[in-house]
Amino acid sequence: MRVDSEYAIETQDLTKIYHARWSGGEVRAIDGVSLRVPKGTIFGLLGPNGAGKTTFVKTLLSAVRQTHGSALIFGRDASDPEARRPIGYLPENHRFPTYFTGAGMLDFYASLSGVSASRRKKLIPEHLELVGLSQWGAMRIGKYSKGMLQRLGLAQALIHSPSMLILDEPTDGVDPVGRREIRELLVRCESQGVTIFVNSHLLAEIETLCREIAILHKGKVALTGKMHDLTAGKGYRLTVTKPSDALTEELRAKATSMAARDGLIDFQFPSRELVNTAVDLLRAQQCEIESLAPTTSTLEEVFVRTVEKK
């Protein structure tokens, strides 16, 4: 058992097979997933519905036992209760007893995590303020909105000062201002060395927040890597005030695409050499250059290309 691992999560050939009694067949919910999540980073797990994301998380938490393969949490086998002690978990569509107040619920869950009464007395108001609920700690949960419940769930996941957060749709039901506040909170946690593993369908949120991602599809890892590498550009977009017809045609011949809009023309060039040549030609004729920037792919484009190839 390696308790000094540099990875917060490390799986090797992790597989979960469900047997369908009605048909005699089998369903591979996760199929040979090998994944490494470095300590102290924000990592996103993506995938279409039925990709195996929830089964993967449940296996990490030992709510589901894998058919074969291994899963380590900070170097410990995930089936070891001690491996789960440093984890804070926020599931999707979580349910808290509605008779609790917000503060009472945090007190209950913190006590389950072994936080002393004196420590809880200090931590509960701090965490209510942290998630923007300091004014509603005495209110019964049954009166909370969905966004308030999501904030409270995040406070619950953080209350015992975990080394890793596993979050399933953490901003679901939260308004835009609240989503920004949660992102800022998670980035602050990352800066303090907390590993954050996020499972979400909100690609724009993942793209803004995560340093690395993995895409699951049909139970397998279809793609993994650093966000900036996966969305890096493969060319340059040059926007100019409409040049002469002759120069326009010369640039069109070098570009991979051209589009006119509002007196401007956008040229897409596949390489630095070609865009430099285009800039030299434009400068020679004293044409105005509005902008020049490397092109990038959105995470949505990367996601769709990856899923459609499989």
Image (tube, rainbow, N blue to C red):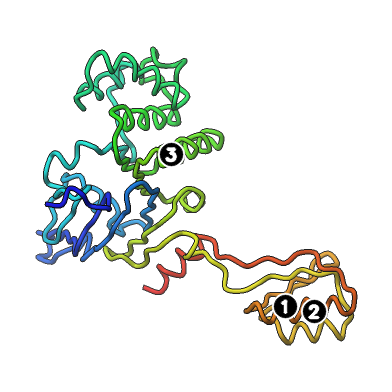
The alpha-carbon separation of the residues under discs 1 and 3 comes to 41 Å
Left or right, 113 with respect to 128, comes to left
Marks 1/2 in contact by CB < 8 Å: the verdict is: yes
Residue 61: image quadrant is: top left
Q: Nearer the viewer, mark 1 or mark 3?
A: 1
Residue at image mark 3 = 186
Q: Residue at x 69, y 70 (%)?
A: 237
Q: Is residue 235 above or below residue 29?
A: below
22 vs 76, nearest the viewer: 76
Residue at image mark 1 = 276
Label 1 CA crowd tier, 10 Å (few <14, some 14–19, many 20+):
few
Mark 1 falls on what kind of element?
A: helix
Give the residue type that dot 1 points to: Asn
The alpha-carbon separation of the residues under discs 2 and 3 comes to 45 Å
Residue at image mark 2 = 280
Q: Residue at x 31, y 34 (%)?
A: 94
142 vs 43, nearest the viewer: 43
Q: Is residue 2 above or below residue 153?
A: below
83 vs 139, nearest the viewer: 83
